[in-house]
Image: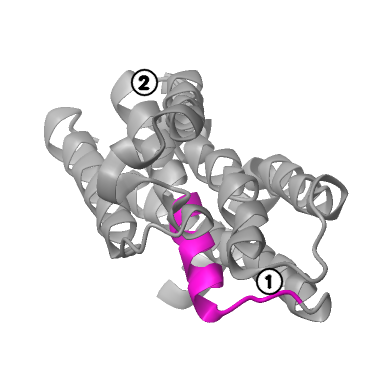
């Protein structure tokens, strides 16, 4: 019964809320071969489309996680359902993260097909950059109470990486492209902390 409830909620949510954002992220992914060459690239050049471009899929997909319920009337409707509001949001984050991973898999496969130097470090390094940007968007959207604030926070941080570069330290998104050697685990941890803090804020401060 519970499993069918989750599947039903997932299907409805995909159809009504997430589909436009998924299509936008898919469109961005399709433009990668137009913006970047994917053939015969060195290790650092292979990282560029994954870190410096495709990472925006995190912004596009994760930032609007709270968007449907930012309308008070819709949020009140969600509250009376069997599944809690925060559970619905957590489910959204989970399946959208899987979609981001799939999009990264497609471009990584294209790089391999083009005989570029690409490893699992490229795949996971790019993916963690996307998830970190998305987590910034999630936090900004929840705390600011508006998805626009989340988009701004995520995109401003993305832009800052081009200017501040390695001055961002362990949270520099383009570490593989710049060959800094800094572990991407910091970005993974940062993403987890941002999501956890956001949900704690919504649960205990906003009382959702």
Residue 81 seen = no
Residue at the image position 45 percent from the left and 60 percent from the top: 179
Helix, strand or loop at disc 2?
A: loop
Lower sequence index among marks 2 and 1: 1
Q: Is residue 188 visible?
A: yes
Measuring 60% from the left and 69% from the top, which residue is drawn there? 43
- Labelled pair 2, 1 in contact (Cβ < 8 Å): no
What residue is shown at x 26% (from left), y 58% (from top)? 186
The residue that label 2 is drawn on is 145
- The answer to whether residue 109 is left or right of residue 12 is right
Magenta segment includes 174: no
Q: Residue at x 25, y 36 (%)?
A: 208
The image position of residue 207, as x and y in percent, is: 18, 32
Residue at numbered disc 1: 108
Q: Residues within 10 Å of mark 1 (few under 14, many from 20)?
A: many
Q: Secondary structure at mark 1?
A: helix
In the image, taking residue 142 as reference, residue 22 lies left or right, namely right
What range is drawn magenta here? 116-130
Where on the picture, by quarter, is residue 78?
top left
In-image side of 10 versus 80 (left or right): right
Residue lying at the far left in this picture: please name it: 204
Instruction: Give the percent coordinates (x, y) of residue 143.
Output: 29, 25
> Seen from this angle, which residue lies furthest right?
34
The image quadrant of residue 206 is top left
User: In this rendering, would 195 be left or right of 66?
Assistant: left
Given residues 34 and 89, the one toward you in this image is 34
């Amino acid at each position: 019964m519970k499993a069918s409830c989750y599947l039903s909620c997932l299907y409805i949510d995909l159809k009504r809320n997430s589909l436009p954002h998924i299509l936008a992220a898919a469109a961005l992914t399709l433009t990668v071969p137009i913006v970047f060459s994917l053939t015969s690239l060195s290790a650092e050049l292979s990282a560029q489309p994954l870190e410096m471009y495709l990472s925006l899929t995190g912004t596009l997909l994760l930032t609007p996680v709270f968007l449907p319920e930012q309308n008070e009337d819709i949020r009140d409707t969600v509250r009376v359902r069997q599944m809690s509001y925060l559970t619905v949001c957590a489910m959204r984050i989970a399946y959208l993260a899987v979609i981001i991973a799939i999009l990264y898999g497609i471009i990584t496969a294209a790089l391999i097909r083009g005989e570029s130097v690409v490893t699992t470090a490229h795949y996971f390094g790019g993916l963690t950059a996307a998830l970190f940007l998305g987590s910034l968007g999630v936090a900004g959207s929840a705390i600011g109470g508006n998805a626009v604030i989340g988009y701004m926070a995520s995109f401003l941080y993305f832009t800052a990486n081009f200017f501040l570069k390695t001055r961002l330290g362990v949270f520099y998104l383009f570490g593989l492209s710049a060959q800094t050697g800094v572990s991407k685990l910091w970005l993974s941890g940062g993403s987890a902390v941002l999501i956890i803090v956001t949900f704690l804020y919504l649960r205990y401060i906003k009382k959702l």
